[in-house]
Image: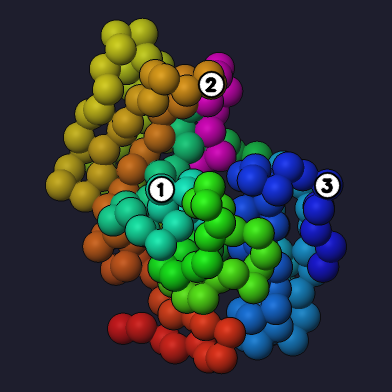
Amino acid sequence: MSYNTNQNKYSENTQENCLLEFLDRYVYKRLYASVEFNPGKEVHFEIDIPNGTEKHVIKGQLTKSAINKPKDSFSFSVLTNTEPGWFVMPELDTDVYVLAFIKQAKVNSYGYMKSFEDIEELELLFIDKREIKNYVNENIYDAAMYETAYDMRSKSTRSLFINNAMYLYYSDALADKPVDLVIKKFALDKLAYMHLLVTKESIKELV
């Protein structure tokens, strides 16, 4: 795999590179015989499986407030600027979401990692896209969620609860005025078909 190292050393892109290289070295090379990394707007790994391939999309909690203090939920993009977010974008070819929570890492005085070796403990949830879509669509369909996100933005509504495990959240202070679907981790844990705790020394499957 190759990684972009021509980024500001404290940028979110660099934090993403740290996560990707850690996953490459300490997770995917241990779990799978063949991994093809396809750089692009969305980070895809193509995994060989007995009946073909799976397309994995990596999403991580990479803000400095989440490193070493993982949040109890995960945000899925519904609306950004005037475009559909990646969770409701129909043309995004995805089979599996891999959600990463950095539980322990060495950080500098700015709260950021400088190398993939700074990651000491990583929690991963592997969730089939169909499973999470079915779960969400039992409560709200993508089209309705997208329309609701626009309505929240126009009315400056900060949050709208869908059930006790998920809600829509409007971040009006950010430049692209995003609306995200926030799903609590206890619900995501139940949806995951693989739940791992990873260090440089080992991979432990959580139940």
Q: What residue does disc 3 label? A: 6
Q: Residue at x 21, y 50 (%)?
A: 165
Q: Residue at x 41, y 48 (%)?
A: 65
Q: What residue does disc 1 label? A: 65
Seen from the viewer's position, the closer of residues 140 and 158 is 158
Q: Which mark is residue 176?
A: 2
Q: Residues within 10 Å of mark 1 (few under 14, many from 20)?
A: few
Which is nearer the N-term, disc 2 or disc 3?
3
Residue 77 picture location, percent across and down: 48, 37
Nearer the observer: mark 2 or 1; the answer is 1
- Residue 128 appears in the rendering: no
Distance between the alpha carbons at the discs numbered 1 and 3:
24 Å
Q: Amino acid at mark 1?
A: Ser
Q: Which mark is residue 140?
A: none
Element assignment for label 1:
loop
Asked whether disc 2 touches disc 1, contact meaning CB atoms under 8 Å apart, the reply is: no
Nearer the observer: mark 2 or 3; the answer is 3
Residue 43 picture location, percent across and down: 68, 53
Q: Quadrant of the C terminus?
A: bottom left
Magenta region, residue range: 80-87
Q: Amino acid at mark 2?
A: Asp
Element assignment for label 2:
loop
Seen from the viewer's position, the closer of residues 124 and 93 is 124
